[in-house]
Image (cartoon, rainbow, N blue to C red):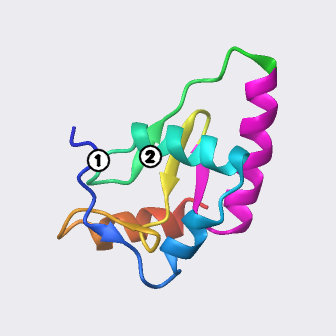
Amino acid sequence: MHKHDFSALGNKMNAAEILADLTPHEALVFKLVMRAADDKTNRGVVKALKNKTEQVKFSKGYKKLVEKNVLYRYKKENYIINPDFIIPLKGEYEKVKEFWDNNK
């Protein structure tokens, strides 16, 4: 599994601006998903947080990132980052985009 060698920030969504404007709750979610995400699939597993306060923060941040079309949960504890936001490794975009489009 490859980690953290993503191709680039997406240009279709103005990813740099979105990242610059993340709230602390959104940043928490994005950081956890990004750390868990595979750079070929943009998918990662984030286990449930044990601390209730962190769970609330995660939930609030997650909802906002979904509204911004940055990521979504496709099954329990499994997340995918929009390939137009963070571009997966070269040659993987089409497969990741198809998964993104078909599993929302």
**Which residue is the site of mark 1?**
4
Q: Along the line of sight, which residue is nearer the eye, 104 or 19?
A: 19
Farthest residue, direction top: 50
Let me know if residue 62 is in the magenta part.
yes
The residue at the point 28 percent across, 52 percent down is: 39
Badge 2 amino acid: Met
State the SS at label 1. loop
Residue annotated with mark 2: 34
| Circles 2 and 1 in contact, beta carbons < 8 Å | yes
Examine the structure image and report whether residue 77 is included in the region drawn in magenta. no
Label 2 vs 1, first from the N-terminus: 1
8 sits to left or right of 26:
left
Specify the quadrant of the image occupied by residue 9. bottom left
Q: Which label sits on residue 77?
A: none
From which residue to which does the magenta span run? 53-74
Image quadrant in which the N terminus is located? top left
Q: Main secondary structure of the magenta part?
A: helix
Amino acid carrying label 1: it is His
| Rendered position, 67 above or below 26 | below
Task: Give the vertical position of 80 relative to 101 (above or below).
Answer: above
* Left or right: 10 in relation to 102: left
Label 2 secondary element: helix
Determine crowd level at label 1: few under 14, some 14-19, many 20+ residues with C-alpha closer than 10 A.
Answer: some
Could you say which quadrant of the image residue 94 lies in?
bottom left
Q: CA distance from mark 2 to mark 1?
A: 8 Å
- Quarter of the image for residue 64 reads bottom right
